[in-house]
Image (spheres, rainbow, N blue to C red):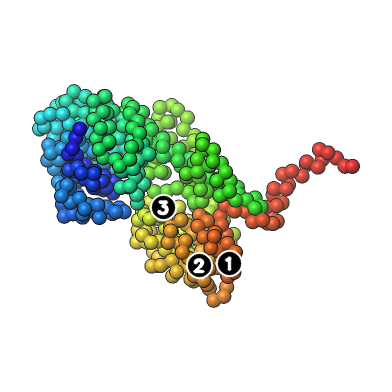
Amino acid sequence: MAKRFSVVGLGKLGGSMAAAIASRGHDVVGVDVNPSAVDALNSGRAPAQETGLDELVGANRARICATMSHETAVLDSELTFVIVPTPSDDRGAFSLQYAAFAFREIGRALKQKHGYHTVVLTSTVLPGACRHGLIPILEKYSGRRCGQDFGFCYSPEFVALGSVIRDFLNPDFLLVGEFDDRSGAQLSDCYRAIVANNAPVARMSLENAELAKISVNAFVTTKITFANMLADICSRIPGGNVDVVSNAIGLDSRIGRKYLTGALGYGGPCFPRDNLALAYFAGAVGATADLPSTTDRLNRSLADRMTAYVVAHASPGSTVAVLGLSYKPASHIVEESQAVALVKALVDRHYRVVAYDPLAGQAANQELRGRALIVDSAEACVSAAEVVLVATPDPEFSGLRATDFSRNGKPAVIIDFWRTLAKTLANEPGVEYVPYGYGRQGDAASEQRVSSLWSDAVAYVGGE
């Protein structure tokens, strides 16, 4: 079993992987084309911004080093993880341009190495990319044969930004796509010495693993979108309650409660693109791609629908406060953020928007280009607004009280998309608390919509 690893790519995922492996007592050589990332790791600092990474690097500095030389890293390790960007292209597929460069350099290094070495791709790719796109590069530049002279696996991680280290060390399962049995067995043994739990290992062909990776995210986003549909329906039923419904159906072992909280849609750097990629690949091989395409379309339409929901509670030209701008709590990332999309839509409708996020304020300000006022605290955000939107379930917001929303005695409207303040604000004077996904009891319009569906029932029994 390998005891010395190399990690090619020192971004949020690769840097976290290198530190996590070192924290389990193994020596790690990091590789990156960015000299600042290499210098940071060699200085005992995090090469990228991720929760807990700086501390973990510092604590394991003696077991981590970094270089810009792929050859140095490969010659000084037994197994190489490759986690470089695979950005989406115009088709919705994943580009291999960065992976191809890394594999060329690794191939050249393998040519200089004596003995067996295993290469493991961790970046997300589509079925066939490893066998037909990347392994040939290794063979061409090394002059060696995969399965005979070196091993290869595809083993993507199922991690979330903001909790990469925890997720990597405590996975639900380990996905191992193997070129041959020897490669898969070696990687499986290595994982046993790396992960902190006894996660099951699913070993399979390269193509099945490539499909399994994007299928997980596509299934989760479909579940999220279904929950968001339930929230919309419940908000239109008198006394409707999406949490009551979700808790009930989540008890079914076939469904489960995770990712079934109806609220704003999904975002971030992975979920949206994986749906599009699955739709592209399905269509490319002649399979039906309606489900991932529909999920993506519904998710992208959510900002406009939520804007209409907000407008129903906000007078024209009023000030709207938005709490939460990242694509999820405890993250600096605003890529594909539903909250940012909502801010843009409100500004386009000539609302004044003031916003706050514990971590993502600077990134959101760059994305919004100054169109909204980004402030430094939740209290400053909500104090001057007629309508307040709770756009992410960040733990910081749960500490807010009714007095924080005071506007010279006038009640503020609080639209809580995640219902995080339901226990503290539901019946408080001085605020009008609107939990999204809950229908108002006694709402005449909703009563009329529902009752009109069954007005013919009386006709079935007739008069006396």
Judging from the image, what secondary structure is the residue with disc 1 in? loop
**Which of pointers 3 and 2 lies earlier in the amino acid sequence?**
3
Q: Residue at x 42, y 61 (%)?
A: 396
- Residue at image mark 2: 401
Dots 1, 3 in contact, CB < 8 A: no
The mark found on residue 328 in the picture is 3
Q: Quadrant of the N terminus?
A: top left
Disc 1/disc 2 C-alpha distance (Å)? 9 Å
- Give percent across and percent down for residue 376: 38, 67
Where's residue 365, x and y in %? Answer: 37, 61
The furthest residue to the bottom: 408
Which quadrant of the rendered structure holds the C terminus?
top right
User: Label 1 crowding class (10 Å Cα cut-off): few <14, some 14-19, many 20+?
Assistant: few
Contact (Cβ within 8 Å) of mark 1 with mark 2? yes
Identify which amino acid the numbered label 1 is placed on: Glu
For the point 51% across and 48% down, the residue is 261
Judge by depth and name the residue closer to the eye, 426 or 440.
426
- Height in image: 396 above or below 293? below
The label shown at residue 428 is 1
Q: Earlier in the sequence, mark 1 or mark 3?
A: 3
Q: Is residue 202 above or below residue 159?
A: above
* In the image, residue 30 above or below residue 134: below
From the top left corner, tell me how far across and down residue 195 is, in percent: 29, 40
Three-letter amino acid code of the residue under disc 2: Arg
Q: Is residue 5 visible?
A: yes
Q: Earlier in the sequence, mark 1 or mark 2?
A: 2
* Residue 384 rendering spot, x and y as whole percentages: 49, 71
Of the two numbered discs 3 and 2 in the rendering, the one whose residue sits closer to the viewer: 2
Inspect the image, locate mark 3, and give the three-letter code of the amino acid beneath it.
Lys
Secondary element type, mark 3 = loop
